[in-house]
Image: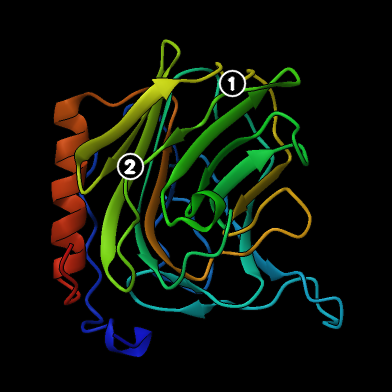
């Protein structure tokens, strides 16, 4: 389905979500990347083309989300996003299984305090959650099957007490042991881009990207999932 066919409504409602512990919330409904968490972490869009004279260029915007094309990405401000336990959730529309393309990668460079989610473990299309802390590497948590292409899906990853989890459409798909992220400021915080040079950029769309500084309960995650479905359904998109 062409992306141009995904926007159906100009009506923008406010999703009713869990607020406790919310660190960042992007709805991608405007040409500025506004943070609705109240923490003023406005994002900045850009690309990495060596021939581009501008540091920041617009991303193709939808009234439901943001469209990552070629080498476009979003940079989030420096900050402490992962003091320990966390939850990250978003809605994803994926076009391909480019190896190691990132949904998000927050860190201080390559293999430097990274908390990351790849859309495609080694080109397999399976979600890949990983944490690098104090120079040590985790064994990643990897989804058991490929994410469907050209469909919107709800993605949620969480970490607490040494265990990472991956949910797809609110169903637990994978869990495993991960290192605890270091409680520090991360400066290279990307959506759609890796901290590793030469790795693929995300080819797809994101909507309703959120970070919490705790693991949401099953009830809270389910409530957010339902609200995400309602919010997207108002714009003609079925999760």
Instruction: Tell me residue 161's x, y (percent).
Output: 41, 10
Residue nearest the viewer, comparing 42 with 160: 160
Q: Is residue 235 shown left or right of residue 157?
A: left
In the rendered view, does 102 fall on the left or right side of 5? right
Q: Is the residue marked by circle 1 packed among few (<14), some (14-19), or many (20+) residues within 10 Å?
A: many
Where is residue 50? Give x, y as percent. 86, 76
Residue in the picture at 28% in, 88% down: 5
104 vs 200: above or below: above
* Separation of residues labelled 1 and 2 (CA atoms): 24 Å
Local secondary structure at mark 2: loop
What is the tally of numbered marks visible in this picture? 2
From the top left corner, tell me how far across and down residue 204 is, in percent.
45, 70
Residue that badge 1 annotates: 181
Helix, strand or loop status at disc 1: loop
In the figure, is residue 57 to the left or right of 95?
right
Q: Residues within 10 Å of mark 2 (few under 14, many from 20)?
A: few
Front position in the image: 222 or 45: 222
Q: Quadrant of the N terminus?
A: bottom left
Residue 151 location, x and y as percent? 27, 69
Residue at image x 51%, y 71%? 203
Left or right, 102 with respect to 52, comes to left
Q: Which quadrant holds residue 202?
A: bottom right
Q: Which residue is mark 2?
A: 144
Q: Is residue 32 above or below residue 1?
A: above
Quadrant showing the C terminus: bottom left
């Amino acid at each position: 389905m062409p992306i141009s066919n995904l926007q159906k409504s100009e009506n923008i409602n406010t999703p009713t979500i869990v607020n406790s512990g919310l660190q960042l919330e992007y709805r991608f409904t405007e040409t500025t990347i506004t943070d609705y968490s109240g923490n003023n972490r406005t994002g900045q869009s850009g690309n990495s083309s060596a021939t581009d004279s501008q540091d920041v260029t617009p991303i193709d915007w939808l009234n439901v989300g943001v469209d990552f094309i070629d080498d476009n990405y979003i940079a989030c401000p420096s900050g402490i996003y992962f003091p320990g336990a966390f939850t990250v959730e978003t809605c994803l529309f994926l076009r391909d299984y480019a190896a190691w393309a990132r949904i998000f990668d927050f860190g201080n460079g390559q293999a430097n305090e990274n908390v990351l989610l790849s859309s495609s473990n080694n080109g397999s299309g399976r979600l890949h959650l990983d944490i690098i802390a104090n120079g040590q590497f985790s064994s990643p948590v990897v989804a058991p099957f490929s994410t469907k292409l050209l469909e919107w899906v709800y993605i949620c990853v969480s970490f607490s007490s040494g265990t990472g989890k991956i949910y797809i459409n609110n169903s637990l798909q994978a869990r495993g042991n991960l290192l605890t992220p270091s409680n520090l400021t991360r400066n290279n915080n990307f959506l759609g881009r890796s901290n590793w040079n030469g790795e693929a950029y995300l080819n797809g769309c994101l909507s309703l990207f959120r970070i919490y500084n705790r693991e949401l309960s099953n009830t809270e995650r389910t409530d957010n999932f339902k609200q995400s479905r309602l919010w997207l359904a108002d714009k003609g998109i079925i999760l």
